Image (cartoon, grey):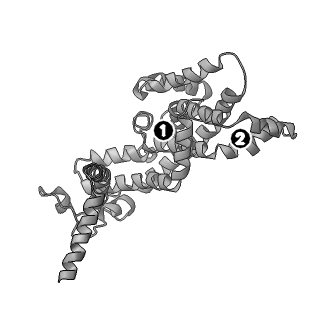
Amino acid sequence: MAERTLVKRSFLDQLALHLSWNRLLFALGFFIFIAMILFPFYWMVSSSFKSGAEIAGRAPVYFPSSLQLDAYRELFDPASPHFQNFSKNILNSILISVPTALLAVILSTMGSYAIARLTFKGRGFMLNSILIVYLFPGILLIIPLFALLSQLGNSLGFQVQDNLNVLMLTYLAQTLPVALYMLTNYFHTIPVEIEEAALIDGCSRLQVIWRVTLPLAIPALVTVGIYTFMIAWNEFLYAFVFLNDRSMFTMPIKLNTIFNDPSPRPNVVMAASTIMTLPVIVLFLAFERFLTQGLTAGGVKG
């Protein structure tokens, strides 16, 4: 008994030696910060498995009594009475988000390399003016974009509404300015001497870009790709204006439709939100190393 008391006292003495008010306050603040981030996500996921009585009751239910799959059946099972055909909405979001990210990376790479490496009049003004478009809220740009695309559609013979390709162009108008700015600053961090050495060795300008510059810019390219993918994946306003056909709805529009249903089913809303959130989380966890390097270097003006 005496030995246990001695061990306990020594443990408390060691704890008191390493614990200070600053460390205690830091640990408490860190715990609160993590709880504020993780608890809403846990509540969303757990609510998707709750029954209607548990999620609609006055008393909060933190742990569902059993894993109910009714919400997911309503989203994906055609035999469900309120079948939502959510897989179609997932496909629509993929068909918009992936090409938007790829085009944004390709176009911003060419434009930002030209600004960072080529010499022409107005280069600095062009780089700074690119962000002016990004400073305007999306709701201010939607009317001019819709009018411009409508005139082009009448001239070239394509429909503006219920057209995923047209919606993708509107997303590029929102994402290209910041992508150009990020990649330009990143290219400034790559030493010019490396490219000059490749040119001396006989490489053309295109070979230098493909073999030297792009491999060094992979963190920034991945960052821009994920950033633009995330914007297109979660975008609501432009999709709400340009899409009227239910079969063309993206996930945010479909989620809003389920939420505003006359017979509300919060567990279905939570299930759809969980499915919509998971791909973004997986991308961030898979490419965390590239994101850290890309955001750090791209955020420093060269």
Q: Residue furthest top?
A: 121
The residue labelled by disc 2 is 213
Q: CA distance from mark 1 to mark 2?
A: 39 Å
- Measuring 64% from the left and 43% from the top, which residue is drawn there? 217
Q: Quadrant of residue 142?
A: top left
The local secondary structure at tag 1 comes to loop
Q: Are there few (<14), some (14-19), or many (20+) residues within 10 Å of tag 1?
A: some
The percent position of residue 175, horizontal first and vertical second, equals: 52, 34
Q: Amino acid at mark 1?
A: Asp
Q: Residue furthest bottom?
A: 1
Q: Amino acid at mark 2?
A: Thr
Q: Is residue 98 above or below residue 182?
A: below
Q: Quick one: quadrant of the C terminus?
A: top right
For marks 1 and 2, the one nearer the N-term is 1
The percent position of residue 40, horizontal first and vertical second, equals: 29, 52
Given residues 46 and 201, the one toward you in this image is: 201
Residue 190 is at least partly visible in this image: yes
Image side of residue 139 versus residue 175, left or right: left
- Measuring 36% from the left and 58% from the top, which residue is drawn there? 75
The residue labelled by disc 1 is 162
Counting labels gives 2
Given residues 140 and 183, the one toward you in this image is: 183
